[in-house]
Image (cartoon, rainbow, N blue to C red):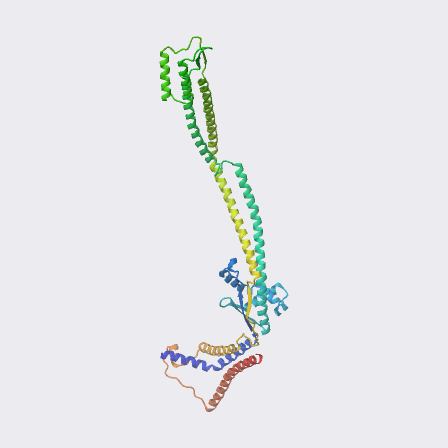
Amino acid sequence: MTSLYDEFRIAVHSVWNRRWLALAVAWGVCLVGWLIIAMIPNKYESKAQIQIRTQTLLSGQVGIDPQDQRKNIQQIGQTLISSGNLEKVIRGTELGATVATPAEMAAKIESLRTNIEVKPEQDDFFAISVKQASGKLARDVVQKLIDVAEDDSIAGDRKEMGQTLRFLDAQIVTRTKELQEAEAKRVAYETQNLGLLPGVGSVSQRMEASRAELSQIDSQLIQARSALAALNGQLAGTPSTLNTPAMGGGAPSALGQAQGELASMRARGFTDNHPDVLSIKSQIANLRAQGGGASAAGGYRSPNPAYSSLQSMRAEREAAVSALQTRKSALQSDMAQLAAKQTAEPGVAAEYQRINRDYEVKKEQYDKLLVNRDQIRLRGQVESQTDAVQFRVVKEPSFSNVPAAPNRPLLLAAVLIVGMGTGVGAAFALGHLQTSFPTAAKLEKASGLPVIGSISQMLTGAERIQRKQKMKLFYGATGGLVGICALLVVAEFVQRGLTA
């Protein structure tokens, strides 16, 4: 601690011995700094507060939810200082009087953007502040910025809505053509591959139907052949002629009558196992055993009606069997052709599914575009006809003749502090550069030799008087530096009071 204190005393002593250098450097730095501060142009600030509302009674009905409304508010706040808006502000105020080229306009826009601050506040409020070379110009810039933002928001929404609708109309026209082409392609493919496509009338369904019909025909054919065989048996046991007595003769013989009754039974469909058939057969056998039961001599044989009826029935059943056989052959031929086509059915079905899928995708996109266009058109009508975006000026642009920047009193005091610090630093640095030793200990440490003693400076009376005069000059110069700073600060406040 003692060593640190000694070092501090040595440093203060070194600076104090070179106090005139420190004072000169401080004066120079302060004068240059105050001159630079005096050359900084004043900037006057104008402030305003606006409210941007996007709520309407129909917002929820047309799909404008609160999140979209907040997004619109944020977007409007961000576009307040867009290049397009700032260019309109420059051309509508005094700033555009000196702009002649696009490069100058671009530089002016960037300069104006750095002097504008748009700060979002609670809900849908925005604070706008602008700094310019005069209070009137700052106020005009704020007012013009609000007007341009309001006009641009309304016109921009309508322009964007119109561009969006034109884009959707063009897309709908394109999608309509694509949808028509896809539909025509699907119809042509269905026509070309009729019967091979899935659904009603496909090859698989036709094969199943043919198999079912073929099974029915086989069953019917078996029944028809059985009936024909039974009929052939009946026909084989029926005589083709009957004994008929001659003219003027007696009644027909008993055998002939019995045979006629048997033929009639068989014509009615009775089988050989029927009780009546068995009884008449037994009676015929008895009559034949008795000698035929012939009628009086001179009779003749006539055609048997039952035999003729059985022959007609056999012809019908033979025709039915032939028809069923022909239908079976036709079905088998069709099934063979369908089996040949069935090998190509998976590829045709896959291609048809691809064509149908493309058509459904285009149809879905087309319907979605129609819905979007109607929603956007309705939303645009709601926003344009109900003033969905409303600008309300909460605080009018302020006007002030008191400069907001720079803060000269603070800068003047800062320059004074910096100047004094620079002077002290210069004196301290010079003390370290010179090869002198402030104390005997420093000398002993540097030389490595013991120091026997030190002699203090002895002043005469004239020298003491001269030193006092120099100290007065030093204090006066230091006080003058501080006084000039105070005078400049007071002058600045007086100037602000006069212009307020």
Q: Position of residue 213 (x, y in %)?
A: 45, 31
276 or 111: nearer the viewer:
276
- Looking at this view, is 173 or 93 the one in front? 173
Using the image as rendered, state which of residue 190 and residue 400 is in the foreground: 190
Work out whether 433 lies above or below 214: below
- In screen coordinates, is 294 left or right of 375? left
Left or right of 137? Residue 278 is: left
Numbered marks: total = 0
Residue 23 image offset from top left, x and y in percent: 50, 81
Q: Is residue 301 above or below residue 457?
A: above
Q: Residue at x 41, y 14 (%)?
A: 256
Q: Residue at x 58, y 49 (%)?
A: 173
Percent across and percent down for residue 414 are: 50, 77
Q: Is residue 485 above or below residue 146?
A: below
**Residue 134 visible to an observer of this rendering:** no
Relative to 279, residue 400 above or below: below
The extreme bottom residue here reads 461
Pick whichever, 314 or 250, lies toward us. Answer: 250
In the picture, which quadrant includes the C terminus?
Answer: bottom right
In the rendered image, is residue 73 in sight? yes
Name the residue: 41% across, 13% down.
Answer: 253
Residue 460, percent from left and from top:
45, 90
| Image quarter hosting the N terminus | bottom left
